[in-house]
């Protein structure tokens, strides 16, 4: 009697990065549920509801405008729009990357009970950030119109700017989520990094005040390019140059591929370490 034996060949399994991608597509409905849960939880029983998302950058803009337009007197026309456009994309990056790390770190109980793609937590955090970004953009556009900033066809390139910013945020979120599984101290440490990173990014000051001898260090900051391609179509009413697009896209792709690779090759260990 001929007995056919089947052997499990692990070498035929796809690379973890590829397997995680297809698993994420299969569980996309779960991402939608997580995003919905995050939005509802955040604004549940809140008097102002979603207006908190818009109120935070608006109040920060007012404070920074009063301080820096009167004390440092930066010669920037429509300075509130300059600040708010930078804050809008910065807040998206900082909040989404932090949430990606937190969602992964606190997901241990769920990962130990059922199988779900680990990247679901990071994707849902960034997707939630995109929802909040959309709400904040409404305020930004309203302020720009009130202050007389000319709104024209250049806004049509903003979806590309947001897509690039999302790609970069997702990559950084993956790196942080991976690190948080192994080193819980990364969470408070990242708050310090964000503070330094914020002041190293021209959110509330013009880039041309950087001394020439430090310009090369300034250009190493990837958020400089992310902020530029988002702010320029709104504040200046012009489309970023090809040079700006290429650099912003390049740093975002590098962040994404490094983050995705690191996150997926370690994904089988997360349930045992969280």
Image: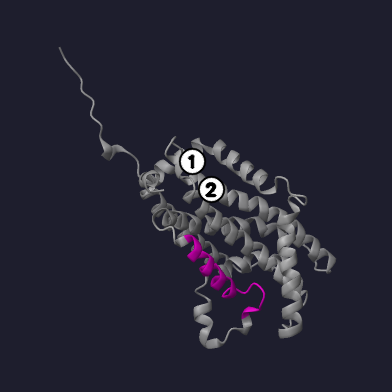
Task: Name the residue at 54% across, 73% down.
Answer: 196
Label 1 SS: helix
Q: Which quarter shows the N terminus?
A: top left
x, y percentage for residue 144?
79, 65
Q: Which mark is residue 24?
A: 1
Furthest residue toward left: 1
Give the magenta-colored segment's residue range.
Answer: 187-207
Residue located at (58% from left, 71% from top): 198
The residue at 62%/79% (across/down) is 207
Residue 248 rendering spot, x and y as whole percentages: 55, 65
Compared with residue 34, is residue 72 higher up or lower down, i.e. above or below?
below
Badge 2 element:
helix
**Residue closer to the observer: 71 or 22:** 71
In this picture, residue 69 sits left or right of residue 163: right
**Earlier-in-chain disc, 1 versus 2:** 1
**Residue 42, visible in the rendered structure:** yes
Question: Marks 1 and 2, how far apart in space?
Answer: 9 Å
241 or 253: nearer the viewer: 253
Residue 123 - label: 2
Tell me, yes or no, whether the highlighted magenta stretch contains residue 205: yes
The image shows residue 232 at horizontal and vertical percentages of 68, 68
């Amino acid at each position: 009697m001929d007995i056919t034996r089947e052997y499990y060949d692990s070498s035929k399994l796809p690379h973890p990065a590829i397997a995680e991608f297809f698993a994420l597509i299969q569980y996309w409905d779960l991402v939608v549920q997580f995003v919905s849960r995050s939005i509802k939880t955040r604004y549940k029983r809140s008097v102002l509801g979603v207006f908190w998302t818009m109120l935070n950058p608006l109040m920060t803009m007012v404070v920074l405008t009063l301080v820096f337009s009167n004390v440092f007197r930066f010669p920037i026309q429509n300075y509130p729009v300059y600040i708010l456009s930078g804050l809008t994309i910065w807040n998206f990056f900082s909040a989404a990357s932090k949430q990606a790390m937190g969602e992964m770190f606190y997901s241990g109980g769920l990962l130990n009970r059922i199988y779900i793609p680990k990247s679901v937590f990071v994707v849902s955090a960034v997707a939630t950030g995109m929802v909040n970004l959309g709400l904040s953009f409404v305020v930004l556009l309203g302020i720009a119109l009130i202050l007389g900033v000319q709104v024209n066809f250049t806004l049509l390139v903003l979806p590309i700017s947001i897509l690039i910013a999302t790609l970069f945020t997702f990559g950084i979120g993956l790196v942080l989520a991976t690190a948080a599984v192994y080193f819980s101290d990364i969470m408070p440490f990242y708050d310090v990094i964000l503070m330094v990173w914020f002041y190293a990014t021209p959110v509330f000051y013009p880039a041309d005040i950087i001394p020439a001898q430090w310009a090369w260090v300034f250009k190493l900051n990837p958020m400089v390019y992310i902020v530029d391609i988002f702010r320029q179509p709104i504040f200046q009413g012009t489309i970023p140059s090809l040079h700006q697009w290429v650099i912003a896209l390049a740093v975002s792709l590098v962040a994404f591929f490094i983050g995705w690779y690191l996150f997926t090759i370690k994904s089988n260990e997360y349930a045992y370490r969280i």
